[in-house]
Image: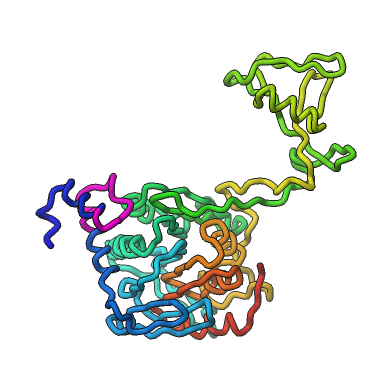
Amino acid sequence: MDYTKQSLNELKKLCKEKKMTGYSTKKKDVIIKLLQAHIDSSNIPSEPSEVQDDLIINTEKFNTEETVINGNVSYFNTDILKFNTTIKFDLIYLDPPYETNRTFTVNSLDDETGFNDVWEENKYSEWIDKLIIHLSSLLTPHGTLVFHISSENSFIAESILRKYFKKIQKIYWKRCHGKNTVKNKLGEMIDVLFACSNNNNIFNMMHTPIDENSVWAFKNKDEKGEYSLGALKHDRTRVGNLYSIIHNGITYQNKYGWKQKKEIVEKLIEEDRIHFAPKQQNMYVKIYKHEHKGVPLSNLWNDIHSITRTSKDPRVYPTQKPQKLLERIIKIYSNEDSYVLDPVCGSGTTGFVADKLKRKCILCDINKETLSVVVNRFKDAIYNI
């Protein structure tokens, strides 16, 4: 079918009939690309050429040989644009080349395992565009694509991602400390993770431990345990719930009101979960240490460091990402038994960690050298999570 002859409304109707998502606000040219990608992803024989541990791959059409790492993880040495499967993924983690115009190796002196990141003019953006279209067709309706790139190379990626996804949250990962060798510009230490989805994607909030010296430190104590103080007083930017509480003959009130309704606060008083400050005529909610999950994770991640040359998470591939980073991403955007895809897997960290977290994972890479790296990772089983 020649989609260029269809009107925008006709194209949207086709998308609806095919039960596609993420098309409603797109322009005509983008919808045409999404429809073409949908056809390609649906064009799999009714009798697939290979079935292995529920991973159904069209190996015959694309000449793609599967290497089963274990019951949860399979590897394919293939160009991801030529790869297809009937499986849909709750999470796709994409850490592609960044167009750095460099050649990356593990060790420039004695280990040339790595890849070439040099591109002709405009070829990189064309490739990323095709890649995003293809990968978006492999997501479940509640799936997330996490696109990982350095902040200094992120413009092209973001402009393309915003064409195909409704929801994009940027996560900033401080991958390293400042470098002493930088003289003529600011040190570059931030990577950006674009978490992209079109619907109500899987999202599991995570928490980080509380610093004992922070404002959340549990410096108070009663018979129930140690607790910190949660503010009840409303700030002055807007009016909260206006009422007063009388306790032990002292009236507690605030001209800007309180954050919680009176009946809620009265119930907390009955449960001895309100801390009174008579001199300030202020009230606080008792937040007990043994009940607290920690600080909700923000979009600034500065507690995970990049790969170092240690035995805990040894570097076996250039641009390898730390296990703890993948652990966090996988836990947030997928559930146990979810399918995860890493289309340019490199050292296979995504599959290595996903397996440990009881997910199923498909790894792909066009570089033949990566297979032995991935196999050895599972053989050595050096975990840092």
Q: Is residue 258 above or below residue 305?
A: above
Residue 371 left/right relative to 327: left
Residue 214, located in which quarter of the rendered image?
A: top right
Q: Magenta segment: does it hold 30? A: yes
Q: Which residues are magenta?
A: 17-33
Q: Looking at this view, is 315 or 348 the one in front?
A: 348
- Residue at the location (34% across, 51% down)? 159
Q: From the image, which quarter does the N terminus lie in?
A: bottom left
Picture quarter with the C terminus: bottom right
In the picture, residue 380 is in which quadrant? bottom right
Q: Quadrant of residue 354?
A: bottom right
Residue ID at (52%, 83%): 69
Q: Is residue 92 within the magenta segment?
A: no
Extreme right residue here? 223
Whole-percent x and y of residue 274? 79, 29
Residue 340, position in %: x, y?
48, 67
Give percent across and percent down for residue 115: 43, 76
Given residues 367 and 110, the one toward you in this image is 367
Q: Which residue is at a point 43% across and 55% down the rendered structure image? A: 142
In this rendered view, identify the residue nearer to me: 193 or 83.
83
Residue 262 in percent (x, y) is at 69, 22
